[in-house]
Structure formats: structure tokens, C-alpha cells
Image (cartoon, coloured by chain):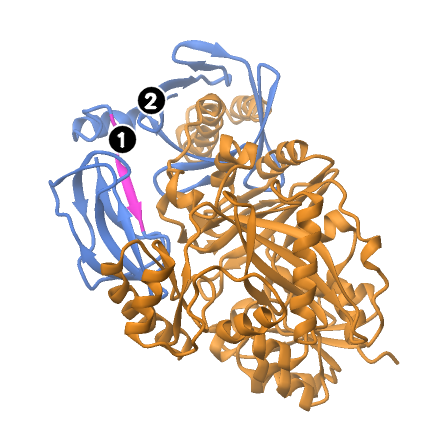
């Protein structure tokens, strides 16, 4: 099975064969990966280097916690990746940014529409939650692919609001 | 029977846990109160007794004085510890409990009242001889013209503050006279809506300022001592994030001077129990000025405990029982260096927006010099109703440099998944030259640090491989069985066993 794994828009190809042998961009990697009885806790030995990780599967990616950092890792198998390529999603080689609501609230302002080009740091929308106005900004230069909310909408926690690409 | 033998803890989260521990060590029963959102929080499970006091919003539960009084009566509690926040600096609450025969584990009602109002506090400590920030309008109710004239005479920048203020509310920095009128108007509005009191005053704004505070302990017999300083200069929008003791800029003579001043302020209002006198320290001139007095236990009391060896919460209980302080001023010694990091449920990469949800993975750091005070654990629901403080790590080592290294490692060891926390931000912050050298001021985070998500180049490969292996494992569980029709069961079993060993 082949996977295309992406962190911060940089992708690598990982092949795992039926015997469990792993190829990272074509080169074999010596590994020992163990789950624990704590469902989010894993141990990885890579060429005898030891890593303790927390991995939480989320909707479109895995949230990996390692040495105090949180790393968003998107894993696509080759088939899904090819299909996505056909749809043009991965055509530019950069990933999507999915903006989810971190908490329930109301959309009180929406400053962008589908197809808009946005600059890094540009405010996309304002979510009111617990009497606070929270501004959501574009983490990088991008194009608004989809807007899934409207002004006045009540959103749930982890609801997708805007997709950038 | 001791005077204080059964303590109602009118709080929640990590500070309720902290107080329950002290109660048990002092052979007191601990009575917890909880809102409907907090039924399964650790403090409820740890207490000897627990009473539900209503729906999640604080005004319907933790701030509802009537309900708290009725739990005190029902449980037979003879004392109450308010912790910090909620009713901790509410003189009416302290008075109501005392009138009901329930000992307030805190200072006298009159001291809370006099130090609670910022303008009264300024007048009080001025009389005691404490230095005040220069050029301040000391009239309780100044009109606009007077305020404008005062601003001119003290020189810009100035800061507008609310008389009843706290937590940065109603506070505005003004750089020129033409901004003053509008700033005062907004500060008055904010103050009116937050505190029901529109009185504001002006202070000279010190540009290169540090926030340094002195911990006070006093008994009911008139003995007052100080336990040295804490440096709380690392703040974001006037909220403390990381504190340390001792301060990197305070030497022994300065510590003594500040300590003496703080003791004077406490004596002026007949203070007993634990309290904190806050000062602004001007790094340019090395002068310090009285800011305010907090008439309660503080979040960061822990680092003072660590460097002095004095258990402040147990001392509060002893003082409430009427016992004399066991420690004399000359016996207070500062040993080593302690750093506290407040672990908040906030997303540092999205403007410190509160993060809520269920904690799906949890691991506390441990080892020499590592103390953790936590209000949450695996499976805890972080709700949007209360402040975002989840836990604190309190690190100690012999020197500041070593304490810093130990703090970084403890932060890396602290796992919390399911919600966003400030841990990755602190790791980034502690690695800055400003923090390493200790040369920062109270607006460091606003002025100098960009809230940029860190690069994690060295973690990229292990994260990539681990996530892919987990995805692969999940794929196999989903797909291997249906695809295997043509293979013999034994062959499949053999293959799966091999894979399981590998994965």
C-alpha cells in the first residue's frame, strides 16, 4: 500500500508492503511501532531513536503530539490521492486548510466569499462565543475554496466553516 | 475540636484540588461544591463530601452566595476557603459567612473592602508611606477637565484605570492628549458595564515596567512577615502566563525594601492570612511603586512555596484557627529558583481563543523538582463556562538557568490531547533570548513576540511515519477482511500475525 503523507503542505510518499516493510520516498526505514493500552499513546523506534507520541485521528487528518508540539498530519492512500488529483484538489501540490469552529457559537461576520484570494493574516470571519468575538484569520496566502456558513448561523464545535486551498 | 475542622471549598478546578490536599493534611474534612458541568471533575471525586449547587453558569452556581451558605449549614462546615476568583475578594460574601458562624479562611472583611477599591487602597498605602506611581490624580471623582489637566502635568504616555478594576478591564494606555478624552470615555463605559462603577483615574505609564509582587503572611495576633517576591512580568493582555521566583532583577537589598513596604501596607489595614502586594518596577530607574493589594490566595503562590518551603494554604488554615505564625522574618530564606507555567485551554495560534472538548490523552510530567497542580485528568470535559486554567507546572532547580531547562523538558513531557493548550507556545517562548536572559517587560508578548506556529523540522519524519503506520493499521482493519475471500483462513491469520508484530 502506498500513502502520500503531508505536513505543512510538504508531502512524502510512504510505501508499506504486506510484510510491513516501510519505504520512505523509496528508501527502506527500520522501525518498531507499538500502540499502548492508552488508546492515544504510541511508541516509535526509528533506527533505535525513541519517540513517544500521542496520535488523535481527526476528520481529515491526524493530530500528532510530539515533544510538546502539535503537528497536523494528513495521510492519503494512493487511490484516494489519485481520485483527489482527478478532481483537481491536489493539482497544485499544496493541501487544503480546513477551518473548523473550536466551540459552539454564532457567525456574526463573514468577510470572504468562495473564489476570493486572501493574504496571510487576513480576517475571514468572526465567531461570537461566550460573549467574545473571535477572529479567524488565513494562516497563509490562499484562495477560498468553499464557505460553508452564513452570517447568523449557529455552528457546533468542530463544524467546518471555511475551506482554503 | 479545632475551630476549623470542616472546610467548604467555594471554588473548582486546580485550586479546589490544592485546598482539598491542604485540608486533608491538616485533618480537616473537605466539602466540595460543584456545578452540573463539573460532576466528574477531580476535585469532586477527591473531596470528603460534595454538593451540587446548580447549573453551569458561574452566577447560578459558584457565585451564588445563598446556595453556598445553605451548603455550609447543611454540611456543618465551620469554615470556608474561597480560593481565587469567584467570591475570593468579595467583602459581602466574607461578611455573610462570618455572620453565619463560618470562619472565612482569608483576611478580615475590612481589609478586603479597603484594598478592593483601588482609589481607597492608594490613599491607604500612601498614608503608610508607600511609593505611588508618579503624577496620579488622587481625587476619587475627578471630572473630565481635571483629568485632562492631570494628564498634561504628568506627561504622556499615561494609563487610564478603573477604580474597581481588575484583570486588565477598563485599562487603557494613552499616548497623546487628543486620545485622552475618548480613552476615558471608553474606560468609564467598560468599567460601568463590568463593575457597576464608572470611576477612573490616571497614572503615569511606565514603559519599561516589570510586575513584581510580594507575598505576605500575617496572623491574628498582629505578626506580619513577607516571603519574598515573584516576578510576573510575562503577561498577555494583563493576564499572567509564566511567573518566577526570585525575580531575575531583584537583589537582596531591594527585596528587603520591597518586603518592608509590603508589610507596612498590610499592617495599615490590620491584615491577616495570605495576601499579595503588587508593585510596578521601573527597569530604567530601578524604582518601584505600589500597584494594588490582592486580598486572597493567588494562582502563583506555588513558586513562593517552592523557594521558601512554606506551605501557604496550610498556613492560611492555621491562621484562621487563631494560631500564631511559626516562621519569623529572619527565618525566611529563598532557596534556588522556581518557575510556574499556567497551562491554559487556549489556542495560541488562533489568537488564544478558548478551546473546549474532552481530554482524550493526558500525561503529567514528573521527576526531581517538578510539581504539577491540575484540575483535570484523562476524560475531563473542558467546558466554556469558566476560566481556561487547566493545570500549573511548578518547576524548581538550584539556578534560573537549570530551572529553565527543566521547565522546557517538563512542558515536552506534558501530554494533553483533545483540546488545544498553551504548551507549544510556552516552549517557543522559553527558547527566546529575552526569556533566557530575563530581560523582558510586561508588554513583551504584545510588542516583540510574533504568535507564529513553530517549525518542527526535526519532528517531521517521526510524525509522518507514525501517522502513516496508524492510518495503515486502520485501513487494514477496515479492508483486509472483505478482500481476503480467496485466501485461506490460516494463511490470512499468519499474515495478520506478522503484521501485528510489526505494527
Residue at (61%, 36%) from the top-left corner?
A: A36
Residue at (28%, 52%) from the top-left corner?
A: A135
Chain assignment, label 2: A
Q: Quadrant of the rendered structure where residue B485 is? A: top left
Crowding near the residue tagged with mark 1, few <14, some 14–19, many ≥20 C-alpha atoms within 10 Å: some
Crowding near the residue tagged with mark 2, few <14, some 14–19, many ≥20 C-alpha atoms within 10 Å: some
Q: Position of residue B264 (x, y in %)?
A: 68, 66
Q: Colour of chain B?
A: orange
Give how far apart the Cα atoms at labels 1 and 2 are.
Answer: 9 Å
Q: Position of residue B413 (x, y in %)?
A: 61, 37
* Pick the front one: B138 or B414: B138
The chain letter of the blue chain reads A
Residue range of the region highlighted in magenta in the rendering: A94-100
Q: Is residue B86 among what the camera can see?
A: no
The relative height of residue B112 versus residue A112 in the rendered view (above or below) is below
Which residue is identified by label 1? A95
Q: Position of residue B54 (x, y in %)?
A: 53, 79
Q: Is residue A149 among what the camera can see?
A: yes
For the image, the number of numbered tags is 2
* Pick the front one: B234 or B128: B128
Residue at (51%, 40%) from the top-left corner?
A: B426
Magenta run includes residue B399: no
SS label for mark 1: loop
Which residue is identified by label 2? A11
Amino acid at each position: 500500500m502506498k500513502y502520500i503523507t503531508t505536513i505543512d503542505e510538504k508531502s512524502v510518499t510512504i510505501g508499506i508492503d504486506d510484510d510491513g516493510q516501510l519505504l520512505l520516498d523509496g528508501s527502506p526505514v527500520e522501525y518498531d511501532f507499538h500502540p499502548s493500552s492508552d488508546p492515544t499513546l504510541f511508541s516509535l523506534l526509528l533506527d533505535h531513536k525513541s519517540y513517544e507520541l500521542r496520535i488523535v485521528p481527526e476528520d481529515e487528518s491526524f493530530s500528532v503530539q510530539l515533544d510538546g508540539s502539535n503537528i497536523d498530519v494528513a495521510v492519503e492512500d494512493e487511490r484516494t490521492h489519485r481520485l483527489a488529483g482527478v478532481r483537481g484538489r491536489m493539482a497544485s501540490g499544496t493541501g487544503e486548510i480546513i477551518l473548523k469552529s473550536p466551540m459552539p457559537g454564532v457567525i456574526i461576520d463573514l468577510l470572504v466569499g468562495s473564489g476570493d484570494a486572501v493574504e496571510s493574516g487576513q480576517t475571514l470571519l468572526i465567531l461570537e462565543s461566550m460573549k467574545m468575538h473571535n477572529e479567524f484569520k488565513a494562516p497563509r496566502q490562499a484562495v477560498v475554496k468553499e464557505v460553508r456558513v452564513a452570517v447568523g448561523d449557529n455552528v457546533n464545535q468542530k463544524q467546518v466553516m471555511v475551506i482554503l486551498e | 475540636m479545632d475551630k476549623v475542622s470542616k472546610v467548604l471549598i467555594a471554588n473548582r478546578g486546580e485550586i479546589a484540588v490544592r485546598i482539598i490536599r491542604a485540608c486533608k493534611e491538616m485533618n480537616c474534612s473537605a466539602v466540595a461544591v460543584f456545578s452540573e458541568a463539573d460532576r466528574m471533575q477531580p476535585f469532586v471525586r477527591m473531596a470528603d463530601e460534595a454538593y451540587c449547587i446548580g447549573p453551569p453558569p458561574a452566577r447560578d452556581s459558584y457565585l451564588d452566595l445563598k446556595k453556598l451558605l445553605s451548603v455550609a449549614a447543611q454540611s456543618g462546615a465551620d469554615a470556608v476557603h474561597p480560593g481565587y476568583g469567584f467570591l475570593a475578594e468579595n467583602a459581602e460574601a466574607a461578611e455573610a459567612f462570618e455572620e453565619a458562624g463560618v470562619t472565612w479562611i482569608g483576611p478580615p472583611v475590612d481589609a478586603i473592602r479597603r484594598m478592593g477599591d483601588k482609589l481607597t487602597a492608594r490613599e491607604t498605602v500612601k498614608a503608610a508611606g508607600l511609593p505611588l506611581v508618579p503624577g496620579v490624580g488622587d481625587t476619587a471623582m475627578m471630572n473630565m477637565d481635571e483629568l485632562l489637566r492631570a494628564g498634561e502635568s504628568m506627561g504622556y504616555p499615561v494609563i487610564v484605570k478603573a477604580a474597581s478594576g481588575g484583570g486588565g478591564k477598563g485599562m487603557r494606555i494613552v499616548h497623546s492628549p487628543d486620545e485622552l478624552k475618548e480613552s476615558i470615555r471608553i474606560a468609564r463605559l467598560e468599567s460601568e458595564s463590568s463593575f457597576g462603577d464608572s470611576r477612573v483615574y490616571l497614572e503615569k505609564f511606565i514603559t519599561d515596567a516589570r510586575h513584581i509582587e510580594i507575598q505576605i503572611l500575617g496572623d491574628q495576633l498582629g505578626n506580619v512577615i513577607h516571603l519574598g517576591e515573584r516576578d510576573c512580568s510575562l503577561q498577555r493582555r494583563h493576564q499572567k502566563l509564566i511567573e518566577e521566583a526570585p525575580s531575575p532583577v531583584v537583589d537582596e537589598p531591594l527585596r528587603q525594601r520591597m518586603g518592608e513596604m509590603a508589610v507596612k501596607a498590610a499592617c495599615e489595614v490590620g491584615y491577616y492570612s495570605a495576601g499579595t502586594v503588587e508593585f510596578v518596577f521601573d527597569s530604567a530607574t530601578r524604582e518601584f511603586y505600589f500597584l494594588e493589594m490582592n486580598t486572597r490566595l493567588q494562582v502563583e503562590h506555588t513558586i513562593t512555596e517552592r523557594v521558601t518551603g512554606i506551605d501557604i494554604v496550610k498556613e492560611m488554615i492555621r491562621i484562621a484557627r487563631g494560631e500564631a505564625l511559626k516562621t519569623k522574618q529572619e527565618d525566611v530564606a529563598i532557596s534556588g529558583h522556581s518557575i510556574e507555567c499556567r497551562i491554559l485551554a487556549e489556542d495560541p495560534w488562533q489568537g488564544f481563543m478558548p478551546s473546549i472538548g474532552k481530554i482524550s490523552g493526558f500525561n503529567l510530567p514528573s521527576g526531581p523538582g517538578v510539581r504539577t497542580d491540575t484540575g483535570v485528568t484523562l476524560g475531563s470535559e473542558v467546558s466554556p463556562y469558566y476560566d481556561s486554567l487547566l493545570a500549573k507546572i511548578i518547576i524548581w532547580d538550584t539556578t534560573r538557568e537549570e530551572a529553565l531547562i527543566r521547565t522546557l523538558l517538563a512542558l515536552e513531557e506534558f501530554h494533553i490531547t483533545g483540546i488545544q493548550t498553551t504548551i507549544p507556545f510556552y516552549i517557543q517562548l522559553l527558547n527566546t533570548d529575552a526569556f533566557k536572559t530575563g530581560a523582558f517587560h510586561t508588554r513583551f508578548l504584545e510588542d516583540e513576540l510574533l504568535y507564529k506556529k513553530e517549525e518542527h523540522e526535526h519532528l517531521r519524519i517521526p510524525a509522518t511515519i507514525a501517522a502513516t503506520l496508524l492510518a495503515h493499521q486502520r485501513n487494514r482493519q477496515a479492508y483486509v477482511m472483505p478482500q481476503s475471500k480467496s485466501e485461506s483462513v490460516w494463511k490470512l491469520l499468519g499474515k495478520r500475525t506478522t503484521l501485528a508484530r510489526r505494527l
